[in-house]
Amino acid sequence: MASNFSGALRLTDLDDFITPSQECVKPVKVNRISGKTAAIKIEADGSHYQVETDGIKTKLEKAEITLNDCLACSGCITSAESVLITQQSQQELYRILGENKGLTTEEQSQRKLVVVSISPQSRASLAAKYKINSQEAAEKLTGFLKQLGVDYVFDTTFARNLSLLESQYEFIRRYNNKATKGSLPMLASACPGWVCYAEKTHGSYVLPYISTTKSPQQIMGSLVKDYLARIHGLTPDMVYHVTVMPCFDKKLEASREDFYNDIYKTRDVDCVITSAEVDMMLDSEGLSLADIESRQLDSLCDHDAAIINHEGGGSGGYVHHIFHYASQELFGAKVHDMQYKTLRNKDFKEVILEHEGEVVLRFALAYGFRNIQNLVQKLKRGKSLYHCVEVMACPSGCLNGGGQIRPLDDEPAKDLLERVEKIYSEIAPVKPEDSEDVKKLYADWLGGKDSIKSKSMLHTQYHEVEKMTNALVIKW
C-alpha cells in the first residue's frame, strides 16, 4: 500500500514516500510498569525493546494506528516499521456489512445505511482490467456491491458537477479581486497529494492561492451525509459512506479534521478503497467483474441514474471548464477549441486567451511532482504568469493514480494507460451548468449558490503544518 502514495507525499525521497525517517514517531506499544524505570532500545534490525533498570528486556509489539494518528510532521509513516493503516481498507467495509447482517430483528434500528460512491477513473481502470466498457463496469460494480449488502451505489461524477461549478464561480471572484495578494493564480484543490504537500512544505506562501472548493469525493461526502441522510430521516453517523478512488492520497483527504462532524462523531467519507482494492475484493470472492449480474446505478434525484463525463481530461477538466466560463463571463469570448501548448514536458501545458491583441487569460496544467516544484518556486519568486493552474500530483493525472490496477507482466504500463483513457473518454460529456438536477440541489438543498450552507457544504480550508524536523536531514 505505502509505495502507492503520490510523489508529492514522498517527503524524504522523491521515489518513495513511505521510507524510514529519522524523526518519525515509532509505532510501538510501551508497557508501563508501576515502580520501574524503563528505556526504549532500538536494535540494529529496527526492533524495539523496553529495557528496565533490573536488566529485563522485553520486545515491544507494533502499535496499530490509523491515518488519523498521523502528526503531519515532515517525517512520514514508515513501511520499514510496518505501520498498519486499518481504517481505510476493504476490511472495514466488510466489517460494517457483517455487523449489519448480524443484527437481530429487534436491533434493526442500529443498522447503518451503507453507501458506496465510485469515481469514473476507478470505473475505467476496472473496465480495462475486465475488458468491458464503462457503462457495463458501472452496472456490474453496482451488482457486485449490492450482492455484498451495500444499499446505494453512486457515481461521483455527479458531485463533480458541483465542484466544477463552484471552481468557476470562485475563479471569477478571485479575478475580480486580483489586486489582493493570494488571489491569483488560483490553484486547483481536487488533488489531496498536492494539498498535503503544500500544507507541509510551503504553508502560508502557497495556501492562499489554492481553491477552497472541495474535491468531488468530499462534495459527495456532503451529499451523502447531509442530503441523503435527511431524506432517510437518519443522522450522519447512521450512514456509512465508502468511496472508490484511483489514488491512495484520497485516504488522507477523507481523514482530514475539516471533514469531521464533531456533533455526530463521523466523517463525510468513512472509508476510501482504491480501484486495485476493489479488484482484490473480487478476487477474494472468486468473481470476475465481467460475469456479475448488472444492476442500475442509484440516483440522488427522482429518476434513473446515467453515468456522465466532463470534457477536459481524466483529472476532472478543471482548467477546461474554468477557462470556458471565465472567457465568456469576463471578456464575452466563446471558446470553441482550446489549443494547449506543451512546454517543458507532456505533463506541463498552457492555454491562453487573446482579446483585442492582448493575452488576458493564461491557464496551465501541471502534473507530477517535478512540475509542481517548478510551479511553486516561480510563484514564491513572484514570477508566475498564470491565472489558474490545474495541479495533480501524479504524472498523466488521476487516470494514472497509484491506486489504479497495475498492468500484467506482459503489458507495458503506457499501453494500459491508453486503454483506460480510451474507456474513460467513451462516455459522452455534459456541461455541469446544464444539469437540472444540479440546479434543483442548489435551490432545495443549499438555498442558492452564495448561501451560508453552500459555503459550508462545498468549500473547505487549509492549514499550514509547523515543521518539527531539521530540514538539513531530509533527503532530496
Image: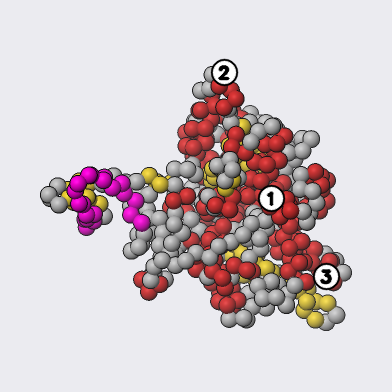
The residue depicted at 31 percent of the width and 49 percent of the height is 28
In the displayed structure image, the side of residue 78 where residue 6 appears, left or right: right
**Mark 2: few/some/many CA within 10 Å (<14, 14-19, 20+):** few
Asked which secondary structure carries label 1, the reply is helix
Which region shows up in magenta? Answer: 25-45
The residue depicted at 50 percent of the width and 64 percent of the height is 465
Q: Which of marks 1 and 2 is nearer the N terminus?
A: 2
Q: Is residue 239 above or below residue 46?
A: above
CA gap, disc 2 and disc 3:
60 Å
Q: Earlier in the sequence, mark 1 or mark 3?
A: 3
In the displayed structure image, the side of residue 70 where residue 118 appears, left or right: right
- Answer whether residue 126 is visible to the viewer in this image: no
For this rendering, which residue is in front, 322 or 367? Answer: 322
Q: Earlier in the sequence, mark 2 or mark 3?
A: 2
- Answer whether residue 452 is visible to the viewer in this image: yes
User: Which secondary structure type mostly characterizes the magenta part of the structure?
Assistant: loop
Tell whether label 3 touches label 1 (CB within 8 Å): no
The residue depicted at 70 percent of the width and 48 percent of the height is 159
Q: Which of marks 2 and 3 is in front?
A: 2
The residue depicted at 60 percent of the width and 25 percent of the height is 109
CA gap, disc 1 and disc 3:
27 Å
Asked which secondary structure carries label 2, the reply is helix
Residue lying furthest right: 332
Residue that carries the numbered disc 2 in the rendered image: 106
Residue 311 at x, y = what percent?
74, 56
In the displayed structure image, the side of residue 256 where residue 152 appears, left or right: right
The label number, if any, that marks residue 330 in the structure image = 3
Residue 190 at x, y = what percent?
63, 57
**Mark 1: few/some/many CA within 10 Å (<14, 14-19, 20+):** many
Residue that carries the numbered disc 1 in the rendered image: 457
Q: What residue type is labelled 1?
A: Met
